[in-house]
Image (cartoon, coloured by chain):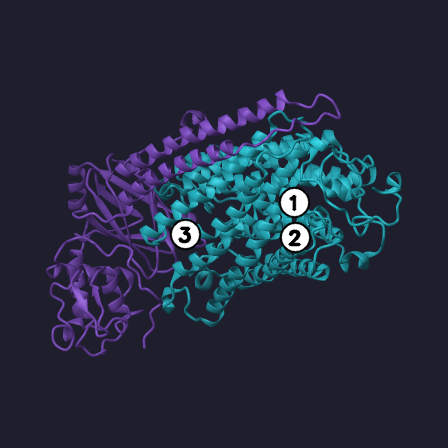
Chain colours: A purple, B cyan
Amino acid sequence: MAGAALAVPFWPPPAAQSATAVDHLFIFLLAICGTVAAGIFITILYFAARYRRRADDEIGSLRPSPLWVELTWTAIPAAIFLFIFGWGARVYFSIYSPQVGALQIYVVGKQWMWEVQHPNGQREINQLHLPVNRQVQLVLTSQDVIHSFFVPAFRVKRDAVPGMYTTVQFHPTKAGEYHLFCAEYCGTEHSRMIGTVTVMEPRDYERWLAGTPRGEPLAATGERLFTKYGCVNCHGNIAPALDGVYMKGIGLADGRVVTADDQYLRESILDPGAKIVGGFPNIMPSFRGVVNEVELQALIEYLKSLGAPAAGYAGEERRPRRPVTRP
Amino acid sequence: MSTHPHLHRDDPKDYLHCEYGIRSWLFTTDHKRIAILYLVSITLMFFVGGAFATLVRLELITPQSDLLQPETYNRMFTMHGIVMVWFFLIPSIPAVLGNFLIPMMVGARDLAFPRINLLSWWLFTASGVFVLITIFIGGVDTGWTFYTPFSTFYSNSYAVAAALAIFINGFSTILTGLNFIVTVHTMRAPGMTWLRLPLFVWSNYATAVIMVLATPVLAITLLLVGIERVFRVGIFDPALGGDPILFQHLFWFYSHPAVYIMILPGMGVVSELVTAFSRKRIFGYHFVAFASMAIALFGFLVWGHHLFVSGQSLYAGLVFSLLSYLVAVPSAIKVFNWTATLYKGSVLLATPMLYALAFIGLFTMGGLTGLFVAALGVDVHVHDTYFVVAHFHYIMVGGMVTAYMGGLHFWWPKISGRMYPEGWAKIAAGLIFFGFNLTFFPQFVLGYLGMPRRYATYPPEFQVWNVLSTAGASILAVGYVVPLFYLFWSMRYGKIAPRNPWRASGLEWEEADSPPIKHNFEEVPTVTKEAYHYHEGVRLG
């Protein structure tokens, strides 16, 4: 414990643009709420002392409560609240809105580990290596229960939810090693579902990429799975061709048009009957329980590589409107 | 009013002494006796829930998992949450003080449905027995929030038993709420207009509305969890075609309003205490009263602020954040009005008033940190960390439990007919205030540092703050045990209480004996004055 007093942490290290943005708002809130709290505490203590009861039968004086006083202390807090709301919303959208050109990394949470897949084929468990000063986007999902990917040094977290994709962005600004926590309670070993995010200078990152044994690129894995599961047998003849399918508008048999984003592609692999492409029969078997989440991400990455209109994930927050069941 | 004010301790008709024997208690329909039954039940549950909290805090002294294995630790914080929320906080002020006081405050002989009131307590007891059985057979490890699909498929604990206990408990809450609503509407004494009602009645009325409207949703949600867990019908589990986020929407549609069930009655108590110990009309009666109703109403529209990082639409997050700031406005109004009530009052810092002022301070802290978590960008960082844990403990323990303690001391002379020992009570209040802050303030720091909640183990750099928090909890525990002893002691040895020891306004003080007779009043009182009519003088006996 010697020297521990010096090591008492008060503030997490800020290591991303989002950290600075959240810190600024947090400090503003500390200042304004601290002032208000101090004002109220001092007023209460002062009144309690100044107007303390001096005689047993003393009563307080009859004071009117004028409307303008009530309206003032209704309106001023309301205005301050609106300001905080606006500021908070700006920071929120900057963290969660998808951005083009980000380095895209897939993350699957499972009891009790984080499985990370880089587009070039590097795979990590409970580790995430990132280059400094580069916009990064994580595409998250879970294989079992809900988890939450939390990096305090970036001030961001995002739930990894089974059955859907969520995303989170950050832009690391400082090299170093930072905590990765699971923030959503996920069972017995929840508090051990932790890891390290390593932010590296570009040259170190290149060295890491080169020195890390990697498999084939993610899209190549996807292509292999595409053959292995026999997708290739039908798609292109009795089933829709998939060239350039990613982010294309798809006309469905029921007349609706949907965008073929990550969520749609995922659903079409697991629940092919949910949204039938117009002009094609409902013949595809479900791959639920056959392909796992990690493989699904590889398959989608492969489909993206088949000439996508725009790179990058754009299916933010699109979820099936209702639980889908096969007819 | 009474023809023999000096005789009331020996008066065989007072509610404590009009009948004897265990049956006269267990099958009573007297709202005051039922209040005492609840007092005993929830005190027991408070110490059960407190024991779990103690184990949690002891485990967290060190970063490793040593006292408890994670699977045990997870059961401890889950049972702590379940017991404290449903078996202490929700019934605390309404079922004990509300039951005792609402009929007297409106000038009625009892609640509208005395036998349903007894049924409420029996349902509560049944659910309490159920939850204790759940604990003894091995407990539950889902967190009090029962998030799916963990609770419906992955948890190897007694989730269905716990859910059933809470399901039964809900009916007790609904029936109490129903009783309060009907009583306030139909049983007010002649002259007791809505705008003459004490603010305690207003806030419990608002609470009752939430109880009746929100609790059924909890029952439905838990039923669905049970159906999915037992029959494998896909509702929330995506592997069965369900939607896990749907559960969160349903759960918080109940549980956020339930947060207001857990604070509005406390606000009502504090309005009574601040006026009584300032001997002054409350500042802005209408604003304080309608703020309660506004909180009850808006409280139903903010549930989505628990889902800011869950994958809910960003735009839904936007709306829920805005509405959350709206619901903060009436809370701010109340704090300002209480503070202004002290101005030029005749302030006496007796124990209940110490609790009331502590409430205002701690509730302010809890409310202001609510502004932090309602800010979308900040919530992305502090969500599910100790910052949130500290925030809601400032509201629920710093707020509600403090108000409950204040109310219990204030009305203790009315309930028991005896005064509590002021010196001991002040020491306990001081211990609670200091212990509470030492327990929970470090958790704000821990939360911003990034320590997630529900962690059995944690990185070593967080240890100092955890040790401080545990030290505070040990002081807090002493603070809560001391009143247990002196309140028991006072029932036999306390100074005999006069009818109106505080010279407070209100029918329960001015028109009823201490303790009151079985039907509260010798004759139905007629109300001619506003609440808090200190300037017109109060009746002492």
Mark 3 neighbour class, 10 Å CA radius: few under 14, some 14 to 19, many 20 or more = many
Chain assignment, label 1: B
User: What element does badge 2 sit on?
Assistant: helix
Name the N-terminal-most of marks 3 and 2. 2
Q: Position of residue A195 (x, y in %)?
A: 33, 45
Q: Quadrant of residue A316?
A: bottom left
Residue that mark 3 sits on:
B304
State the mark number for residue B184: 2
Q: Is residue B176 left or right of residue B494?
A: left
Is residue B231 visible to the viewer in this orientation of the structure? Answer: yes
Tag 1: amino acid:
Leu
Chain assignment, label 2: B
Mark 1 neighbour class, 10 Å CA radius: few under 14, some 14 to 19, many 20 or more = many
Is residue B451 visible to the viewer in this orientation of the structure? Answer: no
Residue that mark 1 sits on:
B197
Badges 2 and 1: C-beta atoms under 8 Å apart? yes
**Vertical order, B34 against A44 (above or below):** below
Nearest to viewer (mark 3 / mark 2): 2
Chain assignment, label 3: B
Mark 2 neighbour class, 10 Å CA radius: few under 14, some 14 to 19, many 20 or more = many
